[in-house]
Amino acid sequence: MTLFSAVELAPRDPILGLNEAFGADTRADKVNLGVGVYYDAKGHVPLLRAVREAEKARLEAQLPRGYLPIDGIALYDSAVQKLLFGASSPLLAERRVVTAQALGGTGALKVGADFLKRLNPDVPVAISNPSWENHRALFENAGFNVVDYPYYDAATHGVDDEGMLAGLAKLPKGAVVVLHACCHNPTGVDLGEAEWKRVIEVVREHGLVPFLDIAYQGFGDGIGADAVAVRLFAQADVPFFVASSFSKSFSLYGERVGALSIVTGSHDEAVRVQSQLKRVIRTNYSNPPTHGAAVVSAVLNHDDLRATWETELGEMRERIRAMRRGLVQRLAGAGDFGFIERQRGMFSYSGLTSAQVDRLREEFGIYAVGTGRICVAALNDTNIDRVAEAITKVV
Ligand code: PMP
């Protein structure tokens, strides 16, 4: 008997497992639609011009490598707040929002979960059905009981609005509700403004705690339009959490750049919440890394770099939308796939069954998630015809 002899082999992450199988596939014309990253028209993870310029200036400045504050770079945190809430938000003027730099969107969710566990240890956490595959495990790991609320309606390829509202209304007071603010992963279907307002009413009436997850701001309809949920909650004057990420919008996946923002009822509350949040961070990883957030901060806080970034973000968004249009056109003979064009962000619940996904992989070397999730941002002019032809053959 050794310390590790009883350790069981953990199940493989399904998406990483898919990537491994893709890597081992020797077919030259294979296509990986199982990924969760944006690829450019040439099939590469882009290095944005705005990022390159900010990095060059940083390198030339030859700065020392001291520790950052526990909650990160102050200019980064304030830039995040403006992006999420809008520069003229009264919440910011009243200094009611606490923002801490975090290790990507995942790190923000984890710090928020750990803080919530101290505030309200016995409430359930509700996630959408389906949701990003890490939501459940992350909140369970933080010690919560995780339940789900209805979200996707396969029949309409849209949101099950009534089911969702009824599901939320059944939750006990204080329950945490994880909401995808835009570009829902994995389905690509989002709530409209009117539906958000109804969700806010239920949240208010039942005393729920919203935890918004915004990992794709700018990939749907634009920076401001994609923040509509955040801004509606801000106007509703309820306390809430926001986990945000620059992994996609800055193509900085490996730099781990995100933030946790907490909206409180007053500046005095914000000061106390911030002090406790810092304790959570301090005992997890002490303080965040410098490089990615310094780059994002430089871009967001300088007019020229900011304009360059907004142009590049717009290009990524338009490329995804063009691929959605192109796929729908090419699938016209295979059925009505018009819903793919109505979905937002990198992903589409394509409606493909798990058997059809297997055939795509085995016969055509096209890899998708077993649920039928495809990454539209991995399509390009070189592979889209092949993908559409293969889908037409398997449906
Ligand atoms: N939330 C959602 C909904 C996501 O899709 C992702 C990333 N795929 C994340 C959070 C995590 O983002 P990050 O890589 O910045 O940790």
Image: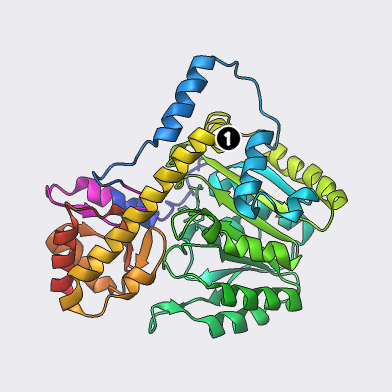
Within 8 Å: ligand 1 and the Cβ of disc 1? no
Coloring basis for residues: rainbow
Residue at 69%, 78% (x, y): give it: 202
Q: Is residue 37 visible?
A: no
Name the quarter where the C terminus is drawn. Answer: bottom left
Question: Residue reaching furthest right?
Answer: 268
Callout 1, which amino acid?
Ser
Is 34 covered by the magenta stretch? Answer: yes
Residue 32 higher or lower than 158, as above or below? above
Residue placed most toward the observer, 106 or 138: 106
- Give the residue displayed 16% in from the left and 57% down from the top: 365
Q: Quadrant of residue 368?
A: bottom left
269 with respect to 206 (left or right)? right
Residue that numbered label 1 is attached to: 297
Which x, y percent locates residue 297? 58, 35
For the point 28% across and 42% down, the residue is: 44
Please tell me how crowded label 1 is: few (under 14), some (14-19), or many (20+) other residues with Cα within 10 Å: many
The magenta-colored residue range is 20-39
Above-or-below relation of 28 to 203: above
Between 165 and 384, which is closer to the camera in this rendering? Answer: 384
- Left or right: where 310 falls relative to 371: right
From the viewer's perspective, is residue 104 above or below residue 15? above
Percent coordinates x, y for residue 12 in the rendering? 38, 53
At a point 31% along the width and 74% down the height, the residue shown is: 351
- Looking at the image, which is closer to me, 200 or 10? 200
Q: Is residue 158 above or below residue 48?
A: below
Query: Percent from the top left, x then y, of residue 189?
Result: 44, 70
Q: Is residue 192 magenta?
A: no
**Pick the front one: 176 or 59:** 59
